[in-house]
Image (cartoon, rainbow, N blue to C red):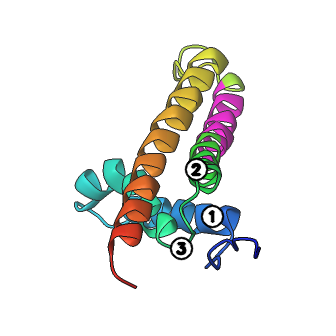
Amino acid sequence: MAAEQDPPRTGTPFAAGLIALAIVVACVLPPILHFVTGPLGPFIGGLVAGSRVSGRPRELAIIALTVGVGLALFTGGIGGLWVAVASSLPAASAPTLSWPVLAEVSAGLLVYGALLAGLGAALAARLKRRSPA
């Protein structure tokens, strides 16, 4: 009895997640248009990334986590620089961003990015399965 073979993979989920993260950043860049594409960027990136993998749940989770963690690290890095510079300023002129607030924003972006990227990747995988190849 012949063993069933998995369908051929079109890409690795981590590479697809990095592509999705690049799309998220690209969605924030265009002036004026970024008000629409920026919040939807993780979903758009997830759609593109989901079409590049076979669509197994593990692969979709890797894409979602790659986008979520990437957004959190980017925000944490930029915000960390901001907090470090702000803490060296005199108290009267320092902005009110603090480490706990930065941690909450980064955690929120991790969840937001991962959820939207996961939804986009799952939708793309479902559409890919339904279309005749």
Provide the secondary structure element on which disc 1 rests.
helix
| Quadrant of the rendered image containing residue 100 | top right
Label 3 packing within 10 angstroms: few (<14), some (14-19), many (20+): many
- In front here: 125 or 87? 125
Q: Which of 60 and 43 is in front in this view?
A: 60
Q: Please indicate whether residue 43 sits to the left or right of residue 3 in the image.
A: left
Q: Residue furthest bottom?
A: 133
Measure the C-alpha gap from mark 2 to mark 1.
17 Å
Q: Is the magenta stretch mostly helix, strand or loop?
A: helix
Q: How many labels does the image show?
A: 3
Measured as percent of width and height from the top left, residue 52 is found at: 53, 73
- Return the residue nearer the eye: 112 or 58: 58
In three-dimensional space, the C-alpha distance between marks 2 and 3, rounded to whole angstroms, equals 14 Å
Q: Mark 1 and mark 3: span between their CA atoms?
A: 12 Å
The residue that mark 1 highlights is 18
In percent of width and height, residue 119 lies at: 41, 48
Specify the amino acid type for callout 2. Pro
Amino acid type of the residue that numbered disc 3 sits on in the rendered structure? Arg
Q: Name the residue under label 3.
A: 52
Q: What stretch is highlighted in magenta?
A: 73-86
Give the vertical position of 131 relative to 84 (above or below).
Answer: below
Q: Which of marks 2 and 3 is in front?
A: 2
Q: Is 60 placed left or right of 9 in the picture?
A: left
Q: Check residue 115 for magenta coloring.
A: no
Q: Name the residue under label 2.
A: 57
- Mark 1 Cα-neighbour bin, 10 Å: few <14, some 14–19, many ≥20: some
